[in-house]
Amino acid sequence: MKLSNAKKIAICMLAWLAAVIAHGWYYVSSVLVPGPLPDPYANEVSFQLLMFAVFRFPIWFAALGVIIWLALRYRTVVPNHSLQARRP
């Protein structure tokens, strides 16, 4: 089964999104600690998600841009050997 370019990009985007979600979950869960803190808002999930969105997500977004740029810049044409094998 041959995938179209749009399907390949969609699969890559879904893999990227899964990696961002996993990193966000790890970031938030590693920062939250039980017990009282001097700054109670810093121990809130919503605040930590905001910090992830401000400080970590731009790095992921830039990486996605670089990956797409590299894919478009250095795409190669791979010969389809299966078509050559079917010819008599």
Image (tube, grey):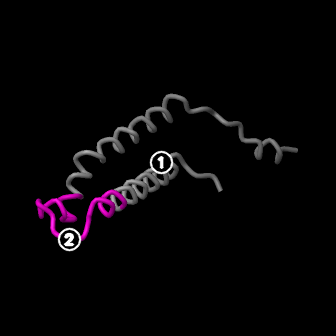
Q: Is residue 17 magenta?
A: no
Q: In terms of secondary structure, where does tag 1 sit? A: helix
Which badge, 2 or 1, comes first in the chain's sequence? Answer: 1
Which image quarter: residue 65? top left
Which quarter of the image is occupied by the N terminus? bottom right
| Front position among marks 2 and 1 | 2
Depth order, front residue of 63/43: 43
What is the number of the mark on residue 35? 2
Per the model, the C-alpha gap separating discs 2 and 1 is: 44 Å
Q: Is residue 41 above or below residue 5?
A: below
Residue 72: where, in percent of width, then height? 48, 33
Q: Which residues are magenta?
A: 26-48
Residue highlighted by disc 1: 9
Residue 27: where, in percent of width, then height? 33, 57
Amino acid type indicated by mark 1: Ile
* Label 1: how many Cα within 10 Å (few below 14, some 14–19, many 20+): few
User: Residue shown at 52%/46% (left/top)?
Assistant: 5
The reply, left or right, for residue 52 in relation to residue 64 is left
User: Residue shown at 43%/51% (left/top)?
Assistant: 16
Q: In terms of secondary structure, where does tag 2 sit? A: loop
Depth order, front residue of 33/74: 33
Contact, CB < 8 Å: mark 2 with mark 1? no
The reply, left or right, for residue 85 in relation to residue 29 is right
What is the number of the mark on residue 21? none
Q: Is residue 48 above or below residue 83?
A: below
Residue 30: where, in percent of width, then height? 33, 60
